[in-house]
Image: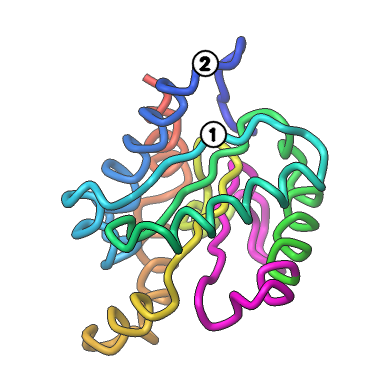
Amino acid sequence: MSPIPSPMPDHLTLISHTQKWLSEVIIHHGLCPFAKREYDAGRIHYAVIETGDLQSQLEQIMLQCLALDADPDRETSLLIFPTALSDFETYLDLLDVATAVLNDQGYEGVYQLASFHPQYRFDGADENDASNYTNRSPYPMLHILREASVERAINNHPNPEKIPDRNIELTRALGLDAMQASLAACYK
């Protein structure tokens, strides 16, 4: 279980927790070797999505895609769902539907979704496997990435295919307690 604060913080605090997670977990541990540049340049947009119904969530995701279309200086968007998607299976359902909707709306090859959740669990992994923390976040999130930027970053990385294995090895070496503490520290 994640130590999500109760009552739910305001939007600025939710974004602050997310930025701390990016800085202190993802960037600090090098889980995404491409995140630091965009984080430091302030090219990551954060949107808090409060709505609980699927249709409204999909509409908000599409609005964020349109905002990315309109602003080439906005490299990526992190959509934070603080209240509606606490159940991981429900979250995965949204991810599947959202991916299909993006493709149906002509965004296949333009944007891709990355997934982060406080209860993230890789298929076949034990719930307490520290490697799940490569995708565990303070709140349920969808990350909209520009596919062209992802391809450029991968092409400029010496061994992009080794990133997932490196992250699994690293998080397991750090251990479950350290990874839990890193995530919990994001709420402070």
What is the residue that sits farthest to the front in this orientation? 70
Residue 123 to residue 65: above or below? below
**Front residue (pair 119, 49):** 49
Residue 97 to residue 150: above or below? above
Q: Can you give x and y, in whole percent of width and height, for residue 39 in the image?
A: 24, 50
Residues drawn in magenta: 101-128
Instruction: Return the mark for residue 48.
Output: 1
Residue 183 to residue 129: above or below? above
Residue 92 to residue 147: above or below? above
Q: Which quadrant holds the N terminus? A: top right
The image quadrant that residue 121 belongs to is bottom right
Say whether residue 145 is left or right of residue 126. Answer: left
Nearer the observer, disc 2 or disc 1? 1
Which SS does the magenta portion mostly show? loop
Instruction: Return the mark for residue 9.
Output: 2
Instruction: Return the mark for residue 127.
Output: none
Helix, strand or loop at label 1? It is strand
Q: In the rendered picture of this protein, how many numbered marks are placed on residues?
A: 2
**Front residue (pair 94, 1):** 94
Q: Can you give x and y, in whole percent of width and height, for residue 8 in the image?
A: 59, 16
Q: Residues within 10 Å of mark 2 (few under 14, many from 20)?
A: some
Q: Can you give x and y, in whole percent of width and height, for residue 60 in the image?
A: 64, 46
What amino acid does circle 1 point to? Answer: Val
What amino acid does circle 2 point to? Answer: Pro
Residue drawn at (53%, 63%) of the image = 114
The image quadrant that residue 170 belongs to is bottom left
Residue drawn at (62%, 52%) of the image = 61
Helix, strand or loop at label 2? It is loop
Residue drawn at (22%, 88%) of the image = 158
Label 2 to label 1: alpha-carbon separation = 11 Å
Residue drawn at (47%, 53%) of the image = 67
